[in-house]
Image (cartoon, helix red, strand yellow):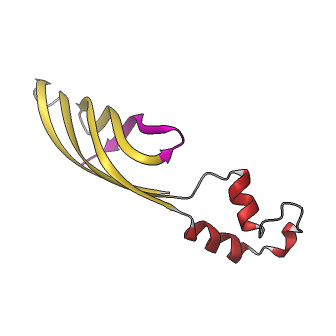
Amino acid sequence: SLSAYVTIRKTAFKLGIPILAKAKLFYGGGYNQHNVTPLMTIDLIEEMMGGDLAADPTNITEDDLIEFLKENRIESSGIHVQAGLQFKVLMLDSFLFYRHTFAKDLVPDADAFGSVNLRLGFGI
């Protein structure tokens, strides 16, 4: 799967100890695009095997499977909102944020999903 997010972010609150540490509370939103392989269901497997689940699966090559998944991939776009914290201590930088994504067809029976991200970085 491949997902791309473009976010506009605004700082809500800053706190800092000069040279040693900084913290920011931020929020934002933006646009997202997704390209994912389909969830393998019985119907999808039956289609891949030519309509017969009793067929010999050894006739399907790796290239056939890859091509089938490419033909049935799900492309979706939507919007998202997020909020989080950024911490900097000396050369260490970290982000902890929650993102709620609104996009159809990515999660079965849901038009939205949430995620929590923790990102760590080291800068010179």
What residue lies at 85% left-to-right and 67% top-to-bottom? 57
- Quarter where residue 69 is shown: bottom right
Q: Is residue 62 visible?
A: yes
Looking at the image, which is closer to me, 55 or 5?
A: 55
Looking at the image, residue 43 sits to the left or right of residue 12; the answer is: right
Q: Is residue 110 magenta?
A: yes
What residue lies at 62% left-to-right and 74% top-to-bottom? 67
Looking at the image, residue 60 sits to the left or right of residue 87; the answer is: right
Residue 2 on image: x %, y %: 45, 58
Residue 10 on image: x %, y %: 12, 36
Looking at the image, which is closer to me, 97 or 75?
A: 75
Residue 40 on image: x %, y %: 67, 53
- Quarter where residue 76 is shown: bottom left
Q: Which residues are magenta?
A: 106-124
Looking at the image, residue 94 sits to the left or right of residue 54; the answer is: left
Residue 117 on image: x %, y %: 39, 36
Looking at the image, which is closer to me, 59 or 117?
A: 59
What residue lies at 23% left-to-right and 33% top-to-bottom? 88
The image shows residue 28, relative to residue 61, as above or below, that is above
Task: Please tell me whether the stretch drawn in magenta is mainly helix, strand or loop.
Answer: strand
Looking at the image, which is closer to me, 58 or 44?
A: 44
Q: Is residue 10 magenta?
A: no
The image shows residue 73, relative to residue 98, as above or below, that is below
Say how many tags the image has.
0
View extreme (front): residue: 51
The image shows residue 74, relative to residue 82, as above or below, that is below
Q: Is residue 21 visible?
A: no
What residue lies at 19% left-to-right and 37% top-to-bottom? 28
